[in-house]
Amino acid sequence: QTRRPVVNFGTKLLVNPNQKANKLLRHLRSAYEFSADISPAHYLMSDSSCAVFLSLKYHAIYGNYIYDTLNALRHSYQLQVLLVLVDHIEYQSALKELTRVSVRTNCTLMLCWSAEEAANYIDNYRHFANKSPDIIMGKGGTGGSGADTDYTRVVDALTCVKSINKTDAVSLISTFDTIDNIVHSDDDQLIICPGMAALKVLSLNNASN
Amino acid sequence: MSSTDTPGDQLLEFEREMFLNVLNDNSLTIASKGVAIDRLLHHLTATYSEKTQLVLVIGTNAELEDYIITQLSADTSTKTQLVLVIGTNAELEDYIITQLSADTSTVGQRPRRLTAETCSAADRRDVYMNGGVIFITARILVVDMLTSRVPFELVSGLIVYNAHTIATDCLQAFIVRLYRMHNKTGFVSALSQTSHAFIGQFAKLDRIMRYLFATKLYLWPRFHVSITESLSSRSAPTVLEIRLSMTPLMKSIQFSLMDLISLCIKELTNSNNSFLYDCDELNAMNVISLNFDSMVKRQFDPIWYQLSAKCRRTVSDIKRLKQLLFSLTQSDSVTFYHEIKAIRQSVVLNAETSDWLFWEPSETLFTASKERLFATKKGKQVIDIEINPKWNAFHEVIQEIDTETKDMCETIDIIVIVENMNTAVSLEKFRDKGVDIVLRELHAKCELLLSGKSETKIKDKSKKTSEETDENLQTLTQLLRTYSKCEESFEHREHKLELHYHNWHQKGIHLQNMLTVLRPKYVILYDPDMQSIRQIESYQALYLSSESVRVYFFMYDGSAEEQRYLKTLHIEKEAFETLIKTKASLVIPSDRDGKSDTHPDLIRGSDDSFILESNPRVGGGQTSSSQVMPTKRIIIDMREFRSDLPTLIHKRGIDIEPMTIEIGDYILTPDTCVERKSVSDLIGSFNSGRLYTQTEVMVRYYKRPLLLIEFDDQKSFNFKGKYWGHNAPISGSHTGRPNVMSQLVVLTIHFPLLRLLWSPSPHFSAEMFEHLKQDREEPDAKQVLAKSNQQLPAEYVTDKYDIETKEFLLCLPGVSITNVYSIMNSVKCIAHLVELSVEELTEIMGNSLAAEQLYRSLHHKVVDRTNDDMNRL
C-alpha cells in the first residue's frame, strides 16, 4: 500500500518532527535534522533502516497508536526497529503484546530503560549502518584487530580449558614459553608450575588429547 | 537384606534408625558431613535390588555407585526391585556397583548404572523392565521419561542423592515432578549431607521439600543423641593433636595477607555500599573460612554486570590472596616465593592492575617471603631455606610409628589425608629422597631465582642442579651432614610403612573405601578436615572393637587453616540448629506427597485450560475444549535441559520432545526456531563469534528465526547497568572489547529478519512460546533432522567435536570458524597439532598466512609486550 517515502538521505540522521519533544534527542550524539518526509517512521538511520519510538507510558494511554504507525509503515525498510522505552513498572503484559506485534509486522524489537539508552541505540544504528560485522565475528574472524597480540590470544586459548584461569595461563606461559612445551610436558612438570592444582593438570591434559 | 557375617555390613544403631525411617517413605534426610549417608544409600540399594522393584537413583557419582555396586554384588540378596538413583557421582556409583557385584550367590538383580556411554537408548527400555536399582544421570532420565521409555507404573521408588542441588538444578526437580505425575504409589527419598545449603533463603527448606514431594524431614546432626550414643558405646580413636607454631616470618606473611584481604574487602564494600544487603557477612574471617565463590555469588549476583571492572577485579584479587594464604602453610617456602614472584612479574601497568600490589602490606609480603629463603650474612646473601614445620613434624611422626612397629614384620598401612595432590607429591618426595635431597633441590631452585633466570625448561633443571652443586658445595655439605642421619634410618625401613594419600577433592567414599580395605591403625590428618574425622570415627566403631586407630592431627596454631577448620564445624552446627527450629514450625500440606491429583505442582496447562481439564464434573460424554485441541509440541535441544524453560513449557501443557538439534534451541513450528541466550551467554557468544554463525544458519533454514534474550528481572541484569553501553562510546570501548549494545545493533543490522524476544523470566518465555505457536502447525522431528542433515555443511551436523577443544583452537591466531573444522577433522589431538610443520598446516587450513600465524603461536615464545614496558619502568 504505502510506497517507500522518497528521501534524499544525506549525512545526517533524519528525525520526524513529531519527535521534537522526545527527551532522547538531548542525548543524541549524531548530528540530526528534522524532516517530515520520513513519516511514518520516527528516525531514519540509513537508507535501509528506520526506527519507531514508543514509550510504554504513552502506549498505556494510546494503545492504538503503535498499530497505526506500524500499519502505515508496512515493509518500507529492510530493517525496522521498534524501540521501546520501558518507563512503566508493570511492563510485562505490554511487552508480551509488543513482542507479538513485532513478530507479526517484521519489526526488530529493542528495549531500553532510559532516554539516554534509547539515544545510544539510535547512535549505534547510525554508526554501524554500513560497517562490516567484524565486532560480532569473534576472535577467529578477520584477526586484524590490533589490540590482540599473539600473547593475549594464547592466554585466551589456554583459559578456554576448563578450570584454568587467567593467572594460571600466564604462569603456564611464563614457565613453559610455548604451547608446544606445555603439551609435551608431563604431569610432574606441570605440577611444579605455581597455582596448578592436580585437577587442573588433569583437565589440561584432557583438552590436549 | 544383607548378610551380617562381616562387621562392615552391620549397621550401627543410629544407622539402622536412619534406614528404617527412610524406607518406603517420601522423606528428606539431612545428615552431617561424614555421617553415614553413603552407607545409608548402600543399604537402601541392597534392599531394593530385586527383580520386582524398580528404583532409580539420581545425583550420585560414579565412585559411590561403583562402591555400592561392588559391595552389594558380594551380598547374598535374592530380591529384585527397580530403584532409580539420581544425583550420585561416578565414584560413588562405582563403589556401590563393585561392592554389589562381588556377590556370587546372588540371584537378585544387581544394581546397574546408566550413562550415555554404558547403554544405548534402545537397550534402556529393557534395562528398566529388568528391574533392580539403576543409577542414572539426570539428563538421560529426563529424556527417557519424556519419551515414555521409563515404565512409570513399574517404578517403585526414586532416590535423590545430594538433594540440596534440587534447589538450583531444575532438571532434577523436573524429574521428580514427571515421576510424581505418572506414578502415584512409589516413594521419593532424598538424601543430603550439605546442611547449610538448606538455609539462607526465605523458606528454602520448604521449597526444596515441595520440589521433592517429601512429607517427612529427618535431621541427623552429629550431635544427635542416637549418634553420640552409638559412637560413645564403642571405643573411640586415639587422637594426638600436634599443634605447630608458625615461624615468625610465616606469621608476618600471614598478617600481611590478612591485612590485604581486609583492605580489599573494605574497598569492595565502600564502593558498593548501596548494593550489599549483608555487609556483615563480608569480613576477612568469613572470607578465608567460607566458600568465597558462593558468597560472592550470593552478594553480587543481582548486580554483577553493574559492578565496575575494578570491583570485579577486587573480587578476583581476594580469591588470589586467599589462595596464597593457604599455600603459605601447605607448600614449601621456595614454591611460595616463586608464586609471589610470578605475581609480581606478571604485573602490567594498566587498568587491570590489582591495587593490592601497591599497598603497604604487600611490601612486607614480598620481603618476608624472600627472607624465608635468603639470609643476609656479612652483607652477602646466603641461601638459608626455611623448611615447612609441618614437614619436620610429619617426618617425626613417621619415625615414631616406625620405631613402634619395629617388631612387626608385615607392612603397616598409614592413611595420610591432605588437601590437595601437590602436598601429597611433595610429602612423598620428602619421604622418598630424605630431607637433604629435597633441600638440595629447593636450593637449586633458589639459585635459579637468585640468578634472575625464570626457570624455563623444567626438564633441564635436574642437569642444572648437578652443575650448580659444585659451586655451592660448601653449604650443601653442611646441610648433608645435618640430615644424613635421618636419611639412613629411612632407607632401611622404607618398604615397611606404606603411605596412602587421600585428598579432599576425592569424594568421601574414597576414604571410606580405603579404610575398609586397608584397615589401617594409623591415620595422619595432615590438613584438618571435619568429614574425614567423622569417617574415621565410624570406621573405628564398625571395625575395630578392641584396639583403637591412632589419629595424628596436624594444625598450625593461630593460622588461617585452623580458623577455617573451626568455622566449618561452626557453620554446620548452626545450620542444623536453624533447621531444627524450622522443622518445629514446618507446615506440610496433606497433599504434599503428590499422590492425589490436586497437588498444584502437578497440574499442567495454563490457568483457563486447567479448569476445564481438572473439573471432575465434566462427564465422559462431553468433550472438553482441551481434548479438541491437538496436543501442542515443541522440539527442544537436549543441551537446553540445563535451564528452567523446558520444565515450564511442559507445565504449561505443551509436550516437549527432546532431541539433539544443531540449529537453534527450540523449534516451535516448522518455520519458527528460537535460539535462547541468557545475558552472560549473549556476551560470551558475541565475543567468540558463535552467535553470528548460529544466526547465519538459523536465517538460512528457518523463515522465522528468533533470538530469545533472557534477562532476569530481579537478578543479575537490567539494562540500566553500565555494562550495557550506558555512556559507552559508540565504536567499542577503550578496553578493546566492543560493548554488547553495539554488537546487538550490528547483529540486527546484518540479519534484519531476526526477531528479538526479550524475556524477563522463563515463565514469560514459556508464555511467549505458547502465543507464538497459536494457530500454527506443530513441528516435525523428521523435518528438523532433515534440515540439519541435508542442507547444512557437514561440520554442523555431528556433535563429535569437543567444544572445549574447539574453543581452544578458535582462540589461537590464524584459526577461524571457517577452518576450525578442517583442523579438527585432520588433527587427532593438540599434541598432534604441534607436531605438524607449517607446510602441513597450510595444506589443512588452505591458507599459508593463517597457517604461519598458527605455527608461530604454537612454537615461538610468546612475549607479553606490555610486560616489557613494565620492566622498563
Image (tube, coloured by chain):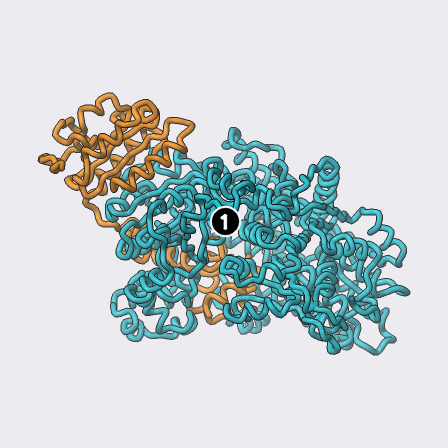
Chain colours: A orange, B cyan
Instruction: Say which residue appears at 53% left-offset and 39% top-offset.
Output: B359
Would you place residue B685 above or below residue B412 in this image? above
Would you place residue B376 above or below residue B598 in this image? below
Camera-side residue of B698 and B738: B698
Side of B196 relative to B274 (left or right): right
Provide residue B705's location: percent of width, then percent of height. Answer: 31, 50
Name the amino acid, label 1: Thr
Side of A13 relative to A111 (left or right): left
Instruction: Say which residue appears at 52% left-offset and 42% top-offset.
Output: B618
The quadrant of the image that shows the N terminus of chain B is bottom right
Question: Total marks drawn?
Answer: 1
Would you place residue B469 above or below residue B708 in this image? below
Q: Quadrant of residue B547?
A: bottom right
Q: Secondary structure at mark 1?
A: helix
Instruction: Say which residue appears at 70% left-offset and 67% top-offset.
Output: B49
- Residue A185 makes an appearance in the image: yes
Camera-side residue of A188 and B477: A188
Q: Chain of mark 1?
A: B
Camera-side residue of B461 and B735: B735
Side of A1 relative to B135 (left or right): left
- Residue A186 makes an appearance in the image: no
Provide residue B404's location: percent of width, then percent of height. Answer: 86, 69
Q: Quadrant of residue B549?
A: bottom right
The residue tagged 1 is: B647
Instruction: Say which residue appears at 56% left-offset and 58% top-offset.
Output: B138
Disc 1 packing (10 Å; few <14; some 14–19; many ≥20): many
Extreme residue in the top direction: A21
Provide residue B194's location: percent of width, then percent of height. Answer: 67, 49
Would you place residue B814 above or below residue B221 in this image? below
Q: Quadrant of residue B572?
A: top right
Provide residue A169's location: percent of width, then percent of height. Answer: 46, 57
